[in-house]
Amino acid sequence: MASEKALFSIGKSLVERFKRVVRDKERNLKDYYLPYYIEVESILSIHLPVITLLNQEVTSYSYTTEEDMMQQLEDIEAHNEEVFDAAARAAQGKSIKDMAREVDSLVIKLKGTISTSLIVSLEQYARNLYEANEIGEYHFLQSPCQNALNLTRDLKANIPSVHSSTHVQ
């Protein structure tokens, strides 16, 4: 009976030690990777409202009499000016091209550190930003930005399992 208690006690202490090692590894992984994912999330969290605002741009009008059409064009111009001003404030003075460069810099900085799937998503998003800058249309940016942001948040929430094969001290 005493030997069973001793054996049980040793087994229990080994399990506790194993749990502690696993918790320490998870904490180390989170401590190491979390700032990178937070950086990506904060940048994309700024981009998303900018893109949402830019999507409110009105680019068409309905045909009416010449007098009504002039008023309609003035209204559209005033609306678009408000939209672009709000987007510029939300972007903190950055243009779409600046936002693309920001994402490119982030990819260069974090390649090999964060999840490959997020790097691929960010590279595609940066290409979309450059394309939007070229053609002056932004409607197709919202989905890639939102998807990259969602992926970032998912990966951030699962750092220990995503980076389980890495060893961080």
Image (spheres, helix red, strand yellow):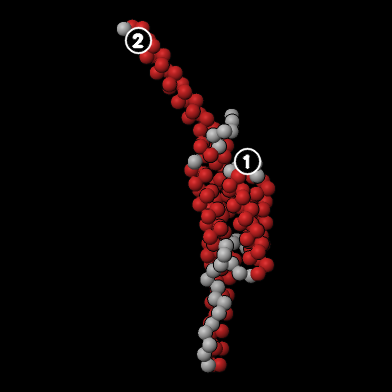
> What is the quadrant of the C terminus in the image?
top right
**Whether residue 74 is situated above or below residue 92 in the rendered picture:** below
Give coordinates of residue 150: x percent, y percent: 50, 52
Residue 82 location, quadrant: bottom right
- Looking at the image, tell me whether mark 1 or mark 2 is earlier in sequence order: 2
Q: Is residue 66 visible?
A: yes
Q: Residue 119 at x, y = what percent?
A: 61, 48
Q: Which mark is residue 32?
A: none
Q: Identify which residue is drawn at 62% across, 41% down.
A: 113
Tell us which disc is closer to us: 1 or 2: 2
In this rendering, is residue 5 above or below 27? above
Say left or right for 104 vs 14: right
In this view of the protein, which residue sits in the foreground, 21 or 115? 115
- According to the picture, the residue beneath numbered tag 1 turns out to be 113
Quadrant housing the N terminus? top left
Q: Is residue 165 above or below residue 9?
A: below
Residue at the (43%, 22%) spot, across then down: 16
Neighbour tally class for label 1: few under 14, some 14-19, many 20 plus, Cα within 10 Å: few
Front-most of 119 and 51? Answer: 119
Dot 1: element:
loop
Report x, y in % for residue 129. 63, 61
The residue under the point 65% across, 58% down is 127
Residue 12 spot, x, y in % from top left: 39, 18
Instruction: Answer with the quarter of the image where residue 88 lies.
Output: bottom right
**Callout count:** 2
Which residue type does callout 2 highlight?
Glu
Q: Residue furthest left?
A: 1
Which residue is labeled 2 in the image?
A: 4
Q: What amino acid is found at the position of numbered circle 1 in the picture?
A: Thr
Distance (Cα) linking label 1 and label 2: 47 Å
